[in-house]
Image (cartoon, rainbow, N blue to C red):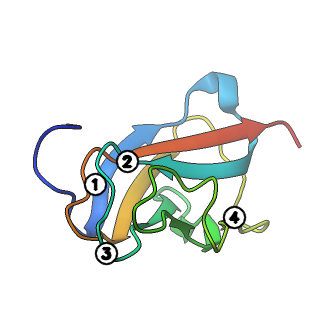
Amino acid sequence: DPNGAVITTGDGKAYFTIPPELNGYNLVDADASVTTVSSSGTPTVQIANVTQAADMLTTKITIDANENTSYTAAVPPVIDGSNDDVATGDIIRIDVDVAGTGTKGLMVILSFQLP
């Protein structure tokens, strides 16, 4: 909810299931945005493949304080090449490791392509 409560830390803030159209694809980009920026602290997000019991990022998504997106983050996310593949029915989980201060409306942007 972009206008609701501030985001909080924890695993499983959101989930989605990989559809058949993405079977065999690889995660190639991961970013995030917020509707209300963090006044201090760096919101930090991990992507986990629950089905494969693996985190998909070796360097997590960060959104710098006072910024709306991770596109210009001081430290860009890095995809784990050993855990970037997805299959039909895989359950993907969004984990918030750092919430920042006053941050609201977290949205995660994932891009997939065939290897």
Q: Which residue is nearer to you in this view: 63 or 59?
A: 63
Reading the chain from its start, which is encountered first: label 3 or label 4? Answer: 3
Q: Residue at x 44, y 50 (%)?
A: 68
Inter-mark Cα distance, 1 to 4: 20 Å
Reading the chain from its start, which is encountered first: label 3 or label 2? Answer: 2
Residue 47's spot in the image, x, y percent? Answer: 51, 59
Q: Nearer the viewer, mark 1 or mark 3?
A: 3
Residue 50's spot in the image, x, y percent? Answer: 45, 58
Amino acid type, callout 3: Ser
Amino acid type, callout 1: Lys
Whether label 1 touches label 3, CB < 8 Å? no
Reading the chain from its start, which is encountered first: label 2 or label 1? Answer: 1
Relative vertical location of residue 63 with respect to residue 107 in this rendering, above or below: below
Q: Which residue is nearer to you in this view: 25 or 77?
A: 77
Relative vertical location of residue 71 with respect to residue 43 in this rendering, above or below: above
Identify the secondary structure beneath mark 1: strand
Residue 83's spot in the image, x, y percent? Answer: 69, 64
Whether label 4 touches label 2, CB < 8 Å? no
Identify the secondary structure beneath mark 4: loop
Point out the residue furthest to the top here: 21
